[in-house]
Image (spheres, helix red, strand yellow):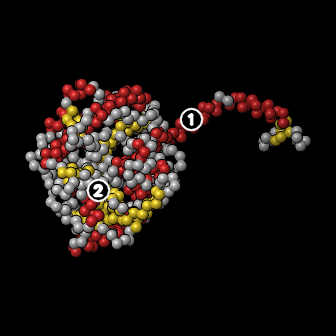
Amino acid sequence: MFGVRHISDGFGHYHSAEQIRCETEANMRSLKGIVPIVCSLLLIVCLVKFREDGAEDFSSYTIQERRNRAEIPRTKSPQYHLGKRRMNVFLMMTDDMRTQLGCYSGEDFSFPTRQQKMSTPNFDRLAAKSLLVKRAYAQYSLCGPSRTSMLTSRRPDTTRVYGNERYWRVVGGNFTTLPQYFKQHGYHVIGLGKVFHQFASSNNQDPISWTEPYFHPPYTDLEYYPSDAAGYKAVTPEQRRDIDLPLTDEASMEHVRGRLEQIAPEARTGKRPFFIALGFCKPHLNFVCPSEFFKHYPLETKPHYLPVKEWQTPVVSEYCNMANVSFTDDGRKRLTDSGLRHLRQAYSACISYVDSLVGQVLDLIDKHGLAESTIVAFVGDHGHHNGENAFWGKQTNYELATHIPMMIHIPGKTDHGIVTRSLVEGVDVYPTIVEAAGLGIIPWCPPGSSSVPICTEGQSMLPLIADPEINLREAAFHQVRQSGFMAYAIRTDRHRYVAYAKVQRETKDNGTDTHTNIWEHDEYWTELYDLYGDPEERYNKTDSPEYQEVKAVLDRRLKSFFTGGFNIPTKEKKA
């Protein structure tokens, strides 16, 4: 082009441009078959190196190492177990179930001073090969807020969900849910029964989270098996034959049985793993279940009442009283002794009914040869008062309403059973299951994370597998809205402290509302319970002189946590 006709090859030889062109084309043709081979060999070397250096076993990390790794931003979906079979996940959830299970007998039973022999062989069977968390706590003792927090790993003040009416993607942020995360990682994701709270609070079970249309039975139990006036029913075999329609939890079980039959082959080979979330409606009211489960629980000879409350402040008194039924003759509907005994019996029967369904799930996983490749988790959304604390229902900050059952089986890690009494929260479920499945560590949320789709305001429980005696956290936190206040609570090993912040709400044009807490106000009521000597939370020590130092420490920690971006509280004087 510039008059250059010959080019040196560096060794004293000169070649014409045309000669070089011809030789180059010949060389390229000869390399055509070699290049793919070389590339394949390089890829194999990279994969081997990745498996040696990259497929990390995060369960051996200390909590500080885990924090350091979690702070590394992850913009792409990591394949930590490339070349290995990714774990399937079968998550079971339940509604209104307290820790009234055989595997929780002892000091962590739902009401430790009133132990009850429970028939829960399948819960006990799962617990025997799981990380059994004896002290796990919901973020909010109501279905919508609790489930939203658990399945987004964000606390209610981030999701802005305080009831069963608001959808977090509208009022909080477009957060990636736990099932949606697995869907994004190529899993076949199936949802059945009650996982999110249904209807408006999840846009009807958050359709974007699932691979296929969500399954919910098209009827309720009460439509075909109406309960008695008191809210319970023992469905007899004759009634079941006459109606010939399964109870709703049974219908969900039948559907998952059919779906697993179809997806199990690909899951067994590792071609396409699954994430199944199955939500049981029981033991939520109305207490309707097959009569065979009532036989385990004879009626109480005398209802277990508690003494009169010791609280004086009006809001706390209103907060603790029953709304529709009461044990006192104060003009409200009275719950009779007989009604109380039958309701408690029916509640226990519903727990055993759910236990039988859990057993069917475990048998189904074994039947399809998936036991060694499937994480099985069971968790409750919140607890329930059955007349204790002069209350029937939920939406309190007490132990009975916030303490939840939680157990996670991870093949090869928990096969011989691990029991921990470390304080754990519902927001810990998401990062734990993701990490256990081999999909990496979920980063911690920065303050004001409404625009961050994937992060956690909890932490993984996997360090408890290596050492169940460590404290995953110094305290658990939860809240519930009541009578114009947000009651915030901190639960340490020994104490529960509750502080009432006044709520200022402003409704926007789109129907959403802002929620501002006013901590300094004339009606700043508090509750303080010493759980070592008062596990029933009967005696409010907030004004007792000997508890003022503890109260000050807890008040400072609670406000710091809820106003400071949910930072893990630093160790301070034990409280």
In the rendered structure, which amino acid carries the disc numbered 1? Leu
Query: Label 1, on which residue?
Result: 41
Q: Quadrant of residue 294?
A: top left
Q: Please provide percent x and percent y for residue 511.
A: 48, 53
Q: Is residue 139 above or below residue 570?
A: above
**Residue at image point 24% right, 72% down:** 543
Q: Is residue 17 above or below residue 425?
A: above
Q: Nearer the viewer, residue 528 or 128?
A: 528
Query: Label 2, on which residue?
Result: 396
**Residue at image point 21% right, 46% down:** 100
Label 2 Cα neighbours within 10 Å, binned few <14 / some 14-19 / many ≥20: many
Figure quadrant of the C terminus: bottom left
Side of 303 relative to 480 (left or right)? left
Q: Secondary structure at mark 1?
A: helix
Q: Please provide percent x and percent y for residue 97.
A: 26, 46
Residue at the limit of the structure toward the bottom, as seen here: 545
Q: Secondary structure at mark 2?
A: loop
Q: Is residue 302 above or below residue 366?
A: below
Label 1 Cα neighbours within 10 Å, binned few <14 / some 14-19 / many ≥20: few
Side of 533 relative to 556 (left or right)? left
Q: Is residue 85 visible?
A: no
